[in-house]
Amino acid sequence: MQETIVIIGAGQAGAQVAQSLRQGGFEGPVRLIGDETAPPYQRPPLSKKYLLGEIGTEALFLRPPAFYTTQNIDLIPGTSVASIDTSGKRVVLERGDTISYGKLVIATGTRARKAPIPGSELDGVVTLRTIADVDAIRERLLTGQKIAIIGAGYIGLEVAAVAKQLGKDVTVIEAQDRPMKRVVSPVISEFYTLLHRGKGVELLLETGVEAIEGEGAVRSVRTSTGKTVPADLVLIAIGAEPNDELATDAGLETDNGILVDGAGATSDEAVYAAGDCTRFYSNRYGRSVRMESVQNAIDQGKVVAQAILGEDVDYDPLPWFWSDQYDIKLQIAGLSDGYDETRVVGDTNVGKFFVAYLKGGRLIAVDSVNSPRSHMMARRVIGETWRDDLLPESA
Ligand code: FAD
């Protein structure tokens, strides 16, 4: 009889591991434990079409619920794992019972970062990570008129776009001097600043938050510049933190993420990890990376299943990501940090262009705005030659 594989976290990565194990011919027990009630689902539409009300819950599901039955994957939803006993090779559930494993995969993802801002506990102050979060946000969006968003990263800006499309008054408050500063170049930030302001979003840059105000329920946000922003709903969108405490408490090596090698193996030989909760060394980028993307969850999930099945694997992907705001699609290939030169091709005024990022003359990343062709080519070219003269001449 083959050993039992237990997976903690029934999200994008966890579900991928389970599916790939079956595709790879594994016939032993697979138990997929998730603390959410829904079957595994994709999160990207949460801040896009799902929030807008264009698609329903079932359209989010990665597989129809019957898939897990037919594949003999024991999906255990609504169940939180409280701890891992690596010497006894079992996980302890919050409700008290235990589940034994031969191999364990931790795929617990991330959680929205909380802000140490006075007033964060007021009714109407929210974060966005789950279906339940969005259902609560949508209800408030439909009744309230004024929404304040703290943080001009992808999620904050995507929600700003949806709220604007729903006819709301939207203010985005960002501490940095430009939106999405951590991940894109000034050209892209400038484009999105103009885009959102053009749609009527009030985008406050270089502005901190002193306090969220209200009695019981939120009423306004007081900024570091002394401005009072009225709000029926405040979304805090200042990034995510890895759910790596289970691993740390079990004695596994962690460092802002569960440390894994190219096979997704942790410091315990029976435990693997995949997805947003992991950190690994990338030879491609010469440093350790922790990624938060569908690409990483899927690809690392596949690699972990292969490793468990005994294949020789070494994961070092070309990362890619996307963000939809209004009718504009931003697609990112590669990691651009550390670039020393950029080349802009296309027309920023008509919103169809791409930015190539070079380091020491080598292409390391490409951000494409409404230019899927350059994105697809970049994914091939960066991966193979690192030269930017193979990119298209126009967007
Ligand atoms: P998750 O999908 O978060 O799954 C982890 C699961 O583990 C969760 O269900 C969690 O509740 C569960 N869990 C945690 N602890 C326990 C425990 N102790 N016991 C049991 N279960 C537990 N990526 C893109 O590439 N493009 C996008 O446009 C994009 N948009 C996004 C928009 C939003 C609003 C969000 C939130 C994310 C977006 N992402 C996007 C990121 C992408 O969704 C994640 O990178 C991906 O979901 C990571 O998969 P994962 O399996 O590692 O984590």
Image (spheres, grey):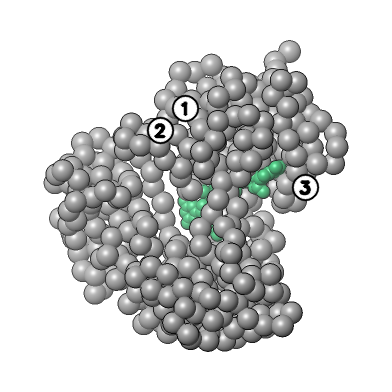
Which callout, 2 or 1, points at the residue further toward the start of the chain?
A: 1
- The disc at residue 261 is 1
The residue positioned farthest toward the top in the image shown:
1
Residue 366 vertical position relative to residue 272 in the rendered view, above or below: below
Image quarter of residue 109: top right
Q: Is residue 18 visible?
A: no
Q: Is the residue marked by circle 3 packed among few (<14), some (14-19), or many (20+) residues within 10 Å?
A: few
* Image location of residue 113, percent across then percent down: 57, 57
Q: Which residue is mark 3?
A: 78
How far separated are the C-alphas under marks 2 and 1? 7 Å
Query: Which mark is in front, 2 or 3?
Result: 2
**Residue 69 appears left or right of 290:** right
Q: Which quadrant: the C terminus?
A: bottom left
Q: Of helix, strand and loop, which one carries label 3?
A: loop
What's the residue at 30%, 56% (across, down)? 367
**Residue 227 appears left or right of 55:** left
**Residue 39 appears left or right of 226:** right
Which callout, 2 or 3, points at the residue further toward the start of the chain?
A: 3
Image quarter of residue 97: top right
Q: Which residue is mark 2?
A: 281
**Residue 318 appears left or right of 98:** left
Q: Of helix, strand and loop, which one carries label 2?
A: strand
How far separated are the C-alphas under marks 1 and 3? 30 Å
Residue 339 vertical position relative to residue 286 in the rendered view, above or below: below
